Image (cartoon, helix red, strand yellow):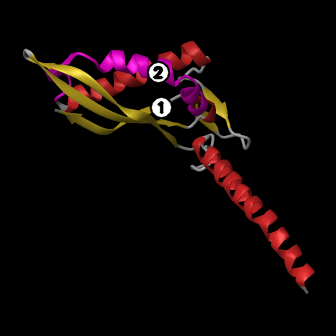
Amino acid sequence: MQVLSLKIRRISHFFKPLGKIIMLSLLLISTASIAAGGGGATITDGKANYLSLEPAFVVNIIDGNRMRFMQLAIDLMSMDSHAIQAVQDHRAPIRHELLMLFAHRDIAAVMGLKQREKLRQDALEKIQETLLKYADIDSHGTAKTEDGHKYPTGVQEVLFTNFVIQ
């Protein structure tokens, strides 16, 4: 009986650290999967897919002779899985172009609805130009799904999901 008790203790000492290692490995794998985009919705060609450009953009704007801040949270809509992947792959030049577009504007250029709509359209054009330059994705083209339905390529919409001026 004594020998059996010793063997069980030795086995349990072996499996305790092994169990912790297995649990830690599973946690790391699931975290890596979520960070790589595996935890979100599936991207489907021909349907609206949304991608947030994070973090939000914070730029200086001019109000008379004083500086103020503008914060913009932006989501993109595309029906093209290749465009979504290209935005993720070329995030740096896209963010650069948008920062250059948004920064040091006069407050009058961003206060009204018409001005914000113009800024949104300008942002869309900058993103489309950047995708054409870096990923050869034409936002004015079309492609077909496996079942033959046509859908537009590239990015179709820029959505301001948060717009704050302080």
Q: Is residue 108 magenta?
A: yes
Residue 106 x, y percent position in the rendering: 17, 17
Q: Image quadrant for the N terminus?
A: bottom right
* Relative horizontal placement of residue 133, taking residue 112 as reference (left or right): right
- 78 up-or-down from 154: above or below: below
Q: Which residue is mark 2?
A: 94
The mark tally for this picture is 2
| Residue that extends furthest to the left in the rendered view of this protein | 64
Which amino acid, by three-letter code, is at mark 2?
Ile
N-terminal of the two: label 2 or label 1? 2
Q: Nearer the viewer, residue 158 or 100?
A: 100
Bounds of the magenta segment: 84-111
Label at residue 18: none
Give the number of the mark in front: 2 or 1: 2
Label at residue 156: 1
Which amino acid, by three-letter code, is at mark 1?
Gln
* Relative horizontal placement of residue 153, taking residue 55 as reference (left or right): right
